[in-house]
Amino acid sequence: MRAAYIEELGSPDVIRWGELPAPLPGPGEVLVDVLATTVNPVDTFVRSGVFRTPIPMPFVIGRDLVGTVASPGCGFAVGETVWCNSLGHEGRQGPTAEQAVVPADRLYRLPSGVRPEDAVAVVHPAATAHLALFAHGGLRAGETVLVGGAGGNVGGAVVELAVRAGARVLATAAPRDHAYVRSLGAAEVVDYRAADVAERLVGPAPDGVDVHIDTSGHHDLRTAVGLLARRGRIVLMAGARAEPTLPVGPLYMKDGSLRGFVISHATVAELAGAAAMLNELLAAGGLRPRAVERRAMSEAADTHRRLERGELHGRRVVLQP
């Protein structure tokens, strides 16, 4: 099969496109013909070595796929359209190839009528948002959520899922993204670069913020704790190298909590719970990507370069064989 793979960690220049032996499914695994995959920031971290995880060389890059079952097994029938968003980690090969082997407990059926390129563009950001809000943020209907970086893929998914859960959503984003974030249901959107961003958010949240999720990785914890409601929760989900100052006293006095969250560490059960919710929303017409750009898998290296240069804001590149 043809695949995008690496034989060493490094820059996008280490990515190769060429022939590799076709994968063979073992016990509890399903062989899938890949229809589409995409590139996430975490894929660049794994490729470069910033995010250390056991990977066999040669290593097929990537994480997410939508495809069709190529051989029956584990309750899946040939031809079923399926998806996965947790390959390329802890020894699992990635999906940027014509075929991939997927553990059956990480493989989910795609609802009928959902286009593969739409689904593959959202399953990773939306699952990340779901677990951040509910598994780690403990969000309940009627609470107030503050989403930092709401114009991005994960940030937009956080806004949409929180609104659907009955929360009131405040957001920060660049001005070019304000209309989009409001279209997702945010009640208030503030320019994250404003010098008085905290003051602008106090009025819309006089009782404080119950769940604060900053997808940008900047982590201004002094402002976050200042805006927090009593027993509010801050979920950290980006910024691997960030070392912000934590105002421990005010956090303690508010009975507040601070939790780190990396979706790569999510359990199979947590991922399955998120997948069930995502499938329900996809089937209902929700969670559609903001913008999709389709490219050949052979352009994986260039897509990694563009992502690292910051050229794909608000846009998902879908790679297809």
Image (cartoon, rainbow, N blue to C red):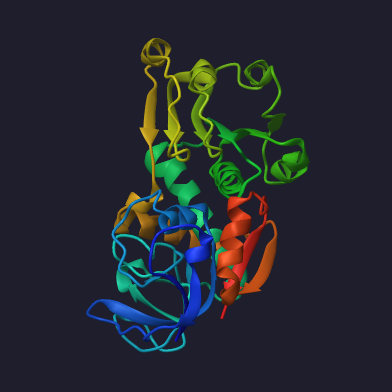
Residue appearing at x 58%, y 35% in the figure: 147
Residue 104's quadrant in the figure?
bottom left
**Image spot of residue 46 (x, y percent):** 41, 56
Q: Is residue 287 visible?
A: no
Residue 197, above or below 99: above
Q: Residue furthest left?
A: 27
Residue 321, above or below 53: below
Residue appearing at x 36%, y 86% in the figure: 21
Residue appearing at x 47%, y 38% in the figure: 239
**Image spot of residue 231 (x, y percent):** 40, 21
Quarter that holds the C terminus: bottom right
Residue 63, above or below 101: above
**Image spot of residue 139 (x, y percent):** 45, 37
Along the line of sight, the residue nearer the viewer: 256 or 245: 245
Residue 29's quadrant in the figure?
bottom left
Residue appearing at x 65%, y 72% in the figure: 295
Along the line of sight, the residue nearer the viewer: 175 or 79: 175
Q: Judge from the rendering whether residue 235 lies leftward or rightward of residue 267; answer left or right.
A: right
Q: Judge from the rendering whether residue 239 lies leftward or rightward of residue 303; answer left or right.
A: left
**Image spot of residue 252 (x, y percent):** 36, 14
